[in-house]
Image (spheres, rainbow, N blue to C red):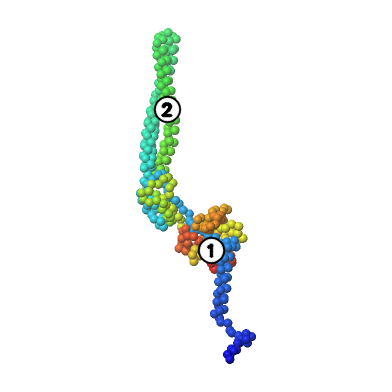
Amino acid sequence: MRRLKIRTLPHTMDNQVRRHSATWTRIAYLALLGAIALWLLDLLFGSSLFLKSEGMVLAPSATIATEYPATVRAIEVKEGDQVQKGHLVARISSQSVNESIARLTTEMATLRARESELRIQSERNESLSRLAGYRSQVATETRARYETLQKRGILPADKRTAAIDSEYKSQYDAEALKAETDAITEQLLRLEPAIDRAEQTLSDLEKTYGRGELTSPLDGIVGRRYVEPGSVIRPGEPIADVYTRDTYVLAYLPTGTLYEVEPGQKVIIRWGVKAIPGRIRTVEPLAVALPKEFQTSFKPVARNQILRIEFDEPADAASRPPLFAKVQVRGTSLLATVFGWVF
């Protein structure tokens, strides 16, 4: 016969002590589930519960361009160079500006020559006017004496006629000189403003052209270069951008959130693993479409409210994120701090 094996009943089994490794595994599993739950909460509802937005580091800038068509002869800077106000950026040449300067210079010479001629003629007429006035006075007195002598019958009629003709000619010459002098004075009055405008235009054009040297209007960093030597540029076409060192963050805040933001509110600016405190400077009363780098695929283009955030002082340039860096902006509330440290 086959011997039956004695089986241990469940209620008679000895209790086994649970191993610690199984306990830590369970804790890690629960922590992982909690982290996933918090991540989903932050992903789906974080921007509605606390201040959470993205932005870009910007700075006030100036665009170097020309007001006239020109040819780029040389570019004296490269992207990222630090420049001072008045630093040479590019050398250009413009045939149209050179022709305009030559034409204005010629016109200025013509106007100056005409002004000199009119002034000489005016001075000559002033000298002749005194003599013409005296001549007219003498002719009038002579004609009056001849008329008296004719009435007495001691002077022939032809003498009286000659005296009248002489008086007429002298008065005619005097009035003609006076009219010509008045006309010259009026021409000078109109010519002087024209000369002043031409001089100012020539001075502005030479100042703007500046021998074809384009300089930086401020202290800062050279951004993008738009052209290369040999390029022909149109009026207003940019050559390069220069940005100041006073950087700030332009952030895009979702609308319709459960929290409020106001100027002066403290925030945390994060990029990568680094963070720096900041403060909301202005809350713009408008919403704009998000730039392409902030848009989400397969979703309609969102329109968020604009925040301008400045870095807390003191904060040197080395501790700030670089220009055009994409950053995250978080509030300083407890909820925002927790999610900010976790994610």
Q: In the rendered view, would you say 318 is above or below 63? A: below
Q: In the rendered view, would you say 137 is above or below 39? A: above
Residue at figure coordinates x 39%, y 51% from the top left: 227
In depth, the one of 134 and 101 nearer the eye is: 101
Q: Which quadrant holds residue 94?
A: top left
Q: Which residue is mark 2?
A: 181
Residue found at the very far bottom of the displayed protein = 1
Contact between marks 2 and 1 (CB within 8 A): the answer is no
In the image, taking residue 330 as reference, residue 244 lies left or right, namely left
Image location (x, y in percent) of residue 342:
54, 68
Q: Give the amino acid type for the residue marked by disc 2 in the picture.
A: Thr
Residue at figure coordinates x 56%, y 53% from the top left: 287
* Element under disc 2: helix
Q: Residues within 10 Å of mark 1 (few under 14, many from 20)?
A: many
Is residue 339 at all visible to an observer of this figure?
A: no
Q: Residues within 10 Å of mark 2 (few under 14, many from 20)?
A: many
Which mark lies nearer to you, 2 or 1?
1
Q: Which residue is mark 1?
A: 268
